[in-house]
Image (cartoon, rainbow, N blue to C red):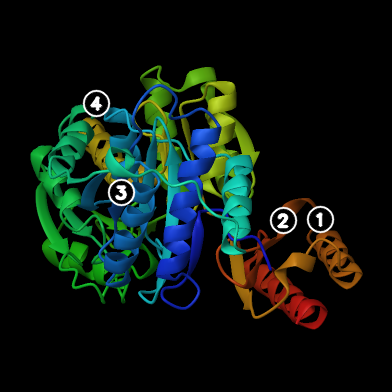
């Protein structure tokens, strides 16, 4: 059996892979592991539990709450809020644990569980491994030590979470957004209420799409994975920019007033230059992943900003930032971490900061994003293959070496197993898009042949 935890928690088809029994068992295991680690020592433990609007989140939330309370943890149920809101509230309320139920950008039938440690930071891999080991041991029949009487956890609905989080977002902005017209696509997800409210409080004229979740329509033809509706709405309303979130709103992509996409690399570049100008870019360094466009690296070099690359996943970006005291990092997919104000990627905060930069400079978003030129980059997802053998297949190693020889210094190749889905991502960058496409298609065929 493979590892339950991927790069961003535990995910799967709800009620098939991710069952109520699994959610309950992992929650009990998490409580026990954190207790053994001394997290709860000397006080009664508290957890913050939130979810996105997926229908399956209702029964999974009930299972998580039951598991935590049965292990002696008091639970604050914050309801439907973004992942970064759960992280923020875990820290601001002094909770010992945060739990978010969401499958982010995945389709509605999927769901997932993410755990946050005290302070709102994602759990270390070592703690996730211990939670999984503990869960498996008790699933095999080892009995739990269970509190009784007054020792069981109590469950409270915490309605103040929404206002507390929105106030935090607006309070950390460097300037207001008065005069800006912004279209927000909430992906019918966790940001459907939060993001429009935050932008409005910051002074923007807000137009919304994708903000009517019904439990079934999350990410359905909208949000950061489907920008067509946002592009059309921005142009139709003559807006200054558009902001698109994913299902749990830990990421943000944008659209300029002409309807052109502004991806995570470009957003990161705009924010990096703004923070450099304000003297807030610590060590004059930004963190990005190996998937970031070569054009981003070149733009940072021109600005005299150092770039550190990490493995894919905002948790690894965050680890690098914390280890070296850095202020800004992110991913091409739109996960952007502003560590002075958030402990994880925060799509609403990212959109607000981007809007604040447009408002402060008086320059259109397209002009600001033009600081970097996106070099042609082809990404092909190869499904239904054995992703565990990407680095050990001699056939693939040879195919990659041949591709790198062909591209030379003008491009690069990256093969990466997905951390959340059963597929391998093939990425090829080159100065010429046709060359990039040809090489990528050849490598995708090699992945199918070697790992299929």
Give the image location of residue 413, x and y in percent.
73, 59
Q: Who is closer to the viewer here, 122 or 442?
A: 122
Q: Is residue 302 visible?
A: no
Q: Is residue 153 left or right of residue 194?
A: right
| Mark 4 secondary-structure assignment | loop
Q: Are marks 1 and 2 in contact (CB under 8 Å)?
A: yes
Q: Who is closer to the viewer here, 96 or 281?
A: 96
Whole-number angstrom distance, CA of label 2 to CA of label 4: 38 Å
Quarter of the picture containing the C terminus is bottom right
Pointer 2 local density, CA inside 10 Å: few below 14, some 14–19, many at least 20: many
| Mark 3 secondary-structure assignment | strand
- Residue matched to label 2: 411
Q: Number of callouts in the render?
A: 4
Give the image location of residue 251, x and y in percent.
38, 51
- Choose the circle earlier in sequence order: 3 or 2: 3
Give the image location of residue 425, x and y in percent.
64, 67
Pointer 3 local density, CA inside 10 Å: few below 14, some 14–19, many at least 20: many
- Residue matched to label 1: 408
Number of the front mark, 4 or 1: 4
Quarter of the picture containing the N terminus is bottom right
Number of the front mark, 2 or 4: 4
- Residue matched to label 4: 174
Whole-number angstrom distance, CA of label 3 to CA of label 1: 49 Å
Whole-number angstrom distance, CA of label 1 to CA of label 2: 6 Å
- Residue matched to label 3: 49
Residue at 78%, 60% in the rendered image = 407
| Mark 1 secondary-structure assignment | helix
Whole-number angstrom distance, CA of label 3 to CA of label 4: 30 Å
Q: Who is closer to the viewer here, 441 or 240?
A: 441
- Choose the circle earlier in sequence order: 4 or 1: 4
Q: Is residue 82 above or below residue 223?
A: above
Whole-number angstrom distance, CA of label 4 to CA of label 1: 43 Å
């Amino acid at each position: 059996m493979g590892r339950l935890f991927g790069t961003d928690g535990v995910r799967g088809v709800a009620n098939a892979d991710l069952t109520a029994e699994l959610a309950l068992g992992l929650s009990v295991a998490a409580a026990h592991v954190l207790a053994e680690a001394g997290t709860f020592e000397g006080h009664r433990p508290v957890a913050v539990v939130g979810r996105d609007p997926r229908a399956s989140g209702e029964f999974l939330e009930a299972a998580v709450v039951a598991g935590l309370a049965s292990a002696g943890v008091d639970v604050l149920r914050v309801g439907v809020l973004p992942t970064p809101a759960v992280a923020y509230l875990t820290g601001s309320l002094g909770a010992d644990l945060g739990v978010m139920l969401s499958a982010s950008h995945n389709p509605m039938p999927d769901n997932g569980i993410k755990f946050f440690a005290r302070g709102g930071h994602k759990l270390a891999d070592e703690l996730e491994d211990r939670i999984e080991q503990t869960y498996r041991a008790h699933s095999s029949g080892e009995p739990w030590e269970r509190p009784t009487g007054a020792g069981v956890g109590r469950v409270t609905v915490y309605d103040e979470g929404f206002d507390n989080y929105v106030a935090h977002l607006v309070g950390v902005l460097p300037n207001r957004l008065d005069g800006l017209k912004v279209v927000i696509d909430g992906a019918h997800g966790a940001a459907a209420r939060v993001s429009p409210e935050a932008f409005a409080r910051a002074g923007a004229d807000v137009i919304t799409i994708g903000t009517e979740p019904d439990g079934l329509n999350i990410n359905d033809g909208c949000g950061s994975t489907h920008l067509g509706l946002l592009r059309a709405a921005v142009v139709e309303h003559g807006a200054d920019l558009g902001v698109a979130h994913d299902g749990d709103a830990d990421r943000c992509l944008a659209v300029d007033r002409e309807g052109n996409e502004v991806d995570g690399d470009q957003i990161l570049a705009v924010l990096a230059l703004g923070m450099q100008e304000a003297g807030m870019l610590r060590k004059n360094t930004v963190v990005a992943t190996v998937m970031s466009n070569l054009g981003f690296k070149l733009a940072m070099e021109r600005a005299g900003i150092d770039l550190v690359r990490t493995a894919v996943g905002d948790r690894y970006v965050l680890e690098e930032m914390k280890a070296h005291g850095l202020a800004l990092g992110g991913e091409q997919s739109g996960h952007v971490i502003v560590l002075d104000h958030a402990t994880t990627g925060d799509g609403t905060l990212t959109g607000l900061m981007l809007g604040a930069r447009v408002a402060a400079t008086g320059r259109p978003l397209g002009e600001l994003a033009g600081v970097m030129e996106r070099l042609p980059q082809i990404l092909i997802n190869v499904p239904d293959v054995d992703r565990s053998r990407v680095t050990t297949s001699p056939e693939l190693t040879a195919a990659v070496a041949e591709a790198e020889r062909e591209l030379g210094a003008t491009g690069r190749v990256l093969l990466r197993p997905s951390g959340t889905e059963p597929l391998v991502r093939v990425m090829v960058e080159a100065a010429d898009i046709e060359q990039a496409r040809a090489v990528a298609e050849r490598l995708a065929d090699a992945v199918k042949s070697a790992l299929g």
